[in-house]
Amino acid sequence: MRMKTLLLGTVFAVGATAMAAPADAQNQFRWARQGDALTLDPMSQNEGPTNTLSAQIYEPLIERANDLGLQAGLAVSWEPVEDTIWEFQLREGVTFHDGAAFDADDAVFSVNRAMAETSDFRNYLSSVEEVEKVDDFTIRIHTAGPNPILPQQMTFIYMMDQDWAVANNVEEPQDYAGGEETFAVRNANGTGPFIVELREPEVRTVLVKNENYWDAANVPLEIDEMVLSPIASDPTRVAALLSGELEFVLDPPVQDLQRLAADPSIKVETVDENRVIFFGMNMGAEDLDDDSVEGANPFADIQVREALYRAIDIDAIQRVVMRGQATPAGVVVPTFVHGYDADLDVRLPFDPDGARELLAEAGYPDGFQATLYCPNDRYVNDEAICQAAVGMWAQIGVEVDLVARTRSIHFQDLQNRVINFYMLGWGVPTFDSEYIFNFLYHTDDGDRGSWNGTGFSDARMDELTQAMLTEVDLAARDSLIAEAWGVAQENLVYLPLHYQVINWAMGADVNVPIRSDNTPLFKYVSFE
């Protein structure tokens, strides 16, 4: 593959020195998406674009293969040795980017770090009571009860070098919600196939091939230098790909897919994504500070939530906004996930007249005013979806002010619980419903419910969520999951919208294996 020269200097703000390739560089890989990673700290933010960048630099004990099955990562094997103990045999001969050897001390440190208060991954490990070093290449994870899905939960727990973390005062994850800046935010030291050479948030990130990568013999690893350039403008991302200044665009705009597919120099890969898009509302507060209702919270009334749901013309959103690149959803669980039930995946009908009647019954015959917060650089056409919904709610008398902003601010405000009505998308890396209940439906108690910005709290839901984590009888566990989905649907905690469809656009001579988790692993990239 020939090396290409960047022409869009004003877009990429590239400096010659910063972009200089290694002396033996053959293949450069320039790619873009609408937003950047929020941080390089691999445990600070459990967020898709951030995890995607981390996955090129850091590695977990257990990895998701391109078919999303489990495969050995930095652990060569794992098994339960007792009902509440999982044992992991670690891979020998692995080094971090600075040359330090990976061993059990690093694994114990990393799992413990992922359970810290400032870690956005602590919900993954809510069952863990202790991490034990057995010998230099064996660890045991002790859980509060049997945990049959612990291997699934370990796929996004990245391994860090304990000595590096101590030396750079990053033993604890970055407090992202608190606005903390640490050494790990812009620097990294993983075992992965790529090494961070330059990090300029919201401008570019330059990675170079790890020449000492432990698995180099089993993956293509053909990229010598990789540059991620966040480009918010849809037309600019497309123009850069068509001109050959980019090899890959992770999120081509749906309105340009036909144009891209028709160009012989471009190919577009498509697959259903493991992600659902929805709206959340703060139903738990007694009063809201950004609505027109004094002394009451309209979202606390399920009739209001149902009215907002029935006012959404999802077919119009799919057809006009998404250009067919979405599937309407009736439940907040992707179809890939264990516990998905097609009988629940049925939307309430679009019924604006019925919505107005529900509002009147709830005491709002003239509607009310509220504020919707929406990211404009995270999901496919996120701001446009919100704009469409705002127009639909206006038809039933609910006047909604839309505040659209970058996802870094959006997610920070959501985690700080300062927004009351919001868009969110949710993928499920464990492919199990417990993950959804743990993060989105369980009471926000510090250990679980970290993305539950609705204030929803139900004792039975909490009991079911915790029970399904330790139940080893499959039929009994499925019964717990089914009951939990019944509670979720009965309370109408979220307003489901649709399942996303992934489209990746790339040069015709570039092969990037597409994945339903929307997390490309660039060590598998090959060039024709």
Image: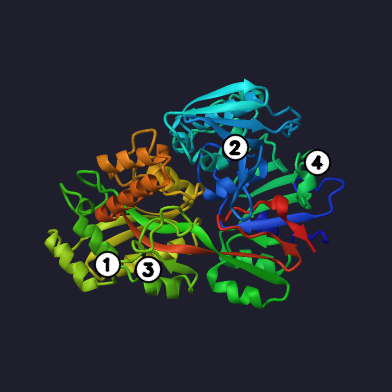
Q: Position of residue 106 (x, y in %)?
A: 63, 27
Residue 139 got which mark?
A: none
How was the colour assigned to the protein in this rendering? rainbow
Secondary element type, mark 3: helix
Residue 211 got which mark?
A: 4
Task: Judge left or right: residue 49 versus residue 486.
Answer: right
Q: Position of residue 96 (x, y in %)?
A: 72, 32
Q: Position of residue 366 (x, y in %)?
A: 15, 65
Residue type at numbered disc 3:
Ala
Task: Please give the name of the residue rendered at 56% of the width and 50% of the height, measured from the top-left corner.
Answer: 49
| Number of disc labels | 4
Q: Earlier in the sequence, mark 3 or mark 1?
A: 1
Q: Earlier in the sequence, mark 3 or mark 4?
A: 4
Residue 310 got which mark?
A: 1
Q: Earlier in the sequence, mark 3 or mark 2?
A: 2
Q: Position of residue 56 (x, y in %)?
A: 66, 45
Residue under label 2, please give it. Answer: 158
Q: Image height check: is 449 above or below 265?
A: above
